[in-house]
């Protein structure tokens, strides 16, 4: 259905039958429809709990975990597309008529990557994900027309960021392709289920296969933005307009992480060593380098590196303890990040914000908005009783039960260090004098305010009844 | 694997050795006139770069894409007898998807100078 809609949208846009606003609204309806279908699949069928189904002549493989991943992707994309409704038509992001089309192509790639069971479809899907990201990063110039989008004062910063993203992302794709070439060269197979059957026979005798799978893992980590391959992330997330960072910083991570965690393509001792090393670097680099930052989006980029460190820690524990902590952490991180980015976008509608010091005394501008911002930052820092604490707690419980004592100690230390810059933001919002905004009150859009209030409600009231989310994700992983 | 491992370890060592010697030993006193680009021995007038019309790049990229589409049509032409009507319709859908991209590019009206 996605492909048909993309084809129709291409035709519609080229002949200018409809305005881009209507295409945005139709795609919002499509994404709501798809997420409802996926929800009903999860709740109504118990077919996929023990095994999966191969589709497209064994180029694809569907089980319950892939459906959960697709659900998360579609759900976040409805929210991202809702941002096209914000602002007046002159300041809107839909000034460029291909914006929704780019997002839809990227989602097609994400769904395809989650379904993929073959090395060729994996590389194809990764390219489909990445190219629209490079395009949308460099789509807007800093003119007066595009004022409400959240730019740097540097005129061409989006284009610089897009160029950096393109070069480093294509390096990651190159690593993935070389790795799959090595795997094919050693095994003679491209289908992943066949490779797993072969691996069960030859346990440790495939040397070049190990090189290939390390290269694929390195390429995926590079595309995610994990340390020690993290250098592009703060520059890209900072230089791109804020509406575009809401989706390039959150949504591509979901299929890559789920693909890393669920696919037995990578030999588990090898994968767990690499991801443990990467999580160690990510935690230290993200927490320490974030202390020096005074721009908001750069800070959020470094905090995303820390959260990726936690997720990689839980990925390395999956083979031994078969739980749902990765998906739960991903969902929590997505909820809080979208909350924060929606709040930043709503502030940008009135006045463009880049630096942390422009948020001084934000309580006096809009009390409820600053309340939700404070709660989401508390949740990111991992302070009970908010939502972020429980996700970190489950991960640390798992790694402690597996006797990874050193890495749990390091992660606890780094979450404490990262608390510094979260609490500094909260102090700036609450206790400083309102210099930059002159006590001007900020008005919100209706759809954005509904989303922000729903997510702050979720983070606040998870303590009281967490069963609702657990019933959705308390499914065994299939390997 | 032994000789391969030695090769992989030795070449960065030799390379870094040469680069470190290059860093440490020579005299490096840069001057403004030493670092400036060469303009027949005279003083510099302007920047060495000029504006590049992006139309050239666009034409090259579009040629590349449709040329690769044509490359895919060559084996289809040789084997058409064996895959008769079913194969024809599969390649038809492939061509339709690429034609959609072509329609989009034409509608943007970018190849006008």
Image (spheres, rainbow, N blue to C red):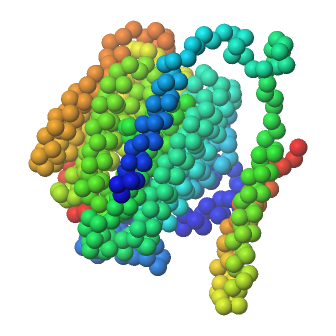
Please tell me which residue is depicted at 32% across the width and 19% down the height of the picture: A424
* Residue at 65% in and 64% down: A7
The N terminus of chain A is located in which quarter? bottom right
Q: Which residue is more in the foreground, A186 or A334?
A: A186
Residue located at (74% from left, 52% from top): B61
Residue B38 placement (x, y as % from top left): 78, 20
Q: Position of residue A170 (x, y in %)?
A: 55, 48
Q: Classify residue A341 as left or right of residue A307.
A: right
Vertically, is A4 above or below A242? Answer: below
Task: Tell me residue A38's x, y (percent).
Answer: 39, 64
Q: Nearer the viewer, residue A78 or A184?
A: A184
Q: Is residue A99 visible?
A: yes
Q: Nearer the viewer, residue A20 or B29?
A: B29
Q: At x 27% / y 38%, what residue is drawn?
A: A280
- Count how many numbered circles sit on residues in the image: 0
Place of residue A58 in the rendered image (x, y in percent of width and height, measured from the top left): 43, 76
Q: Is residue A423 above or below residue A276?
A: above
User: Residue A368, can we see it?
Assistant: no
Q: Which picture quadrant has residue A154?
A: top right
Q: Quadrant of the C terminus of chain A?
A: bottom left
């Amino acid at each position: 259905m996605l492909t048909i809609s993309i084809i129709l949208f291409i035709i519609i846009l080229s002949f200018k039958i409809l305005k881009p606003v209507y295409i945005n609204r139709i795609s919002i309806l499509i994404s709501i429809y798809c997420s409802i279908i996926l929800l009903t699949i999860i709740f109504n069928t118990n077919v996929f709990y023990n095994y999966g189904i191969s589709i497209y002549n064994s180029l694809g493989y569907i089980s319950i975990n892939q459906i959960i991943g697709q659900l998360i992707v579609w759900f976040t994309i409805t929210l991202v597309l809702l941002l096209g409704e914000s602002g007046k038509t002159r300041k809107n992001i839909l000034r460029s008529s291909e914006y929704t089309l780019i997002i839809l192509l990227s989602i097609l790639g994400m769904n395809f990557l989650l379904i993929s069971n073959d090395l060729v479809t994996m590389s194809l899907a990764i390219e489909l994900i990445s190219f629209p990201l490079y395009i949308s990063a460099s789509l807007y110039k800093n003119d007066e027309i595009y004022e409400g989008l959240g730019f740097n004062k540097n005129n061409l910063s989006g284009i610089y960021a897009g160029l950096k993203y393109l070069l480093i992302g294509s390096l990651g794709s190159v690593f993935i392709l070389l790795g799959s070439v090595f795997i094919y060269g050693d095994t003679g197979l491209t289908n992943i289920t066949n490779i797993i059957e072969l691996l069960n026979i030859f346990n440790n005798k495939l040397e070049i296969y190990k090189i290939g799978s390390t290269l694929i893992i390195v390429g995926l980590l590079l595309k995610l933005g994990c340390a020690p391959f993290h250098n592009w992330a703060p520059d890209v997330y900072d230089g791109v307009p804020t509406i575009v960072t809401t989706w390039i910083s959150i949504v591509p991570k979901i299929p890559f992480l789920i693909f890393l965690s669920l696919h037995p393509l990578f030999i588990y001792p090898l994968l767990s060593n690499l991801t443990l090393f990467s999580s160690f670097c990510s935690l230290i680099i993200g927490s320490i380098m974030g202390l020096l930052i005074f721009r908001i989006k750069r800070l959020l980029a470094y905090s995303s590196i820390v959260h990726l460190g936690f997720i990689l820690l839980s990925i390395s524990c999956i083979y031994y303890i078969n739980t749902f902590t990765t998906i739960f952490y991903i969902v929590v991180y997505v909820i809080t990040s979208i909350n924060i980015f929606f709040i930043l976008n709503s502030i940008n509608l009135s006045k463009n914000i880049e630096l942390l010091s422009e948020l001084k005394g934000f309580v006096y501008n809009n009390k409820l908005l600053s309340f939700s911002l404070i709660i989401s930052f508390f949740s990111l820092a991992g302070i009970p009783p908010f939502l972020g604490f429980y996700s970190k707690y489950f991960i640390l419980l798992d790694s402690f039960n597996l006797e990874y004592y050193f890495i749990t100690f390091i992660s606890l230390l780094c979450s404490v260090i990262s608390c510094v810059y979260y609490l500094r933001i909260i102090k700036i919002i609450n206790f400083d004098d309102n210099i930059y905004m002159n006590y001007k009150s900020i008005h919100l859009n209706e759809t954005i305010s509904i989303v922000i209030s729903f997510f702050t409600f979720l983070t606040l009231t998870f303590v009281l009844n967490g069963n609702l989310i657990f019933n959705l994700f308390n499914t065994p992983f299939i390997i | 694997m032994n000789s391969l491992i030695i090769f992989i370890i030795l070449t960065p060592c030799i390379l870094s050795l040469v680069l470190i010697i290059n860093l440490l030993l020579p005299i490096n006193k840069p001057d403004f006139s030493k670092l400036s680009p060469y303009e027949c021995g005279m003083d510099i007038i302007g920047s060495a770069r000029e504006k590049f019309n992006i139309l050239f790049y666009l034409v090259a990229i579009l040629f590349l894409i449709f040329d690769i589409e044509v490359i895919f049509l060559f084996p289809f032409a040789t084997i058409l007898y064996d895959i008769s009507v079913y194969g024809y319709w599969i390649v038809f859908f492939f061509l339709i998807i690429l034609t959609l991209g072509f329609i989009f590019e034409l509608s943007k009206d970018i190849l006008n100078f």
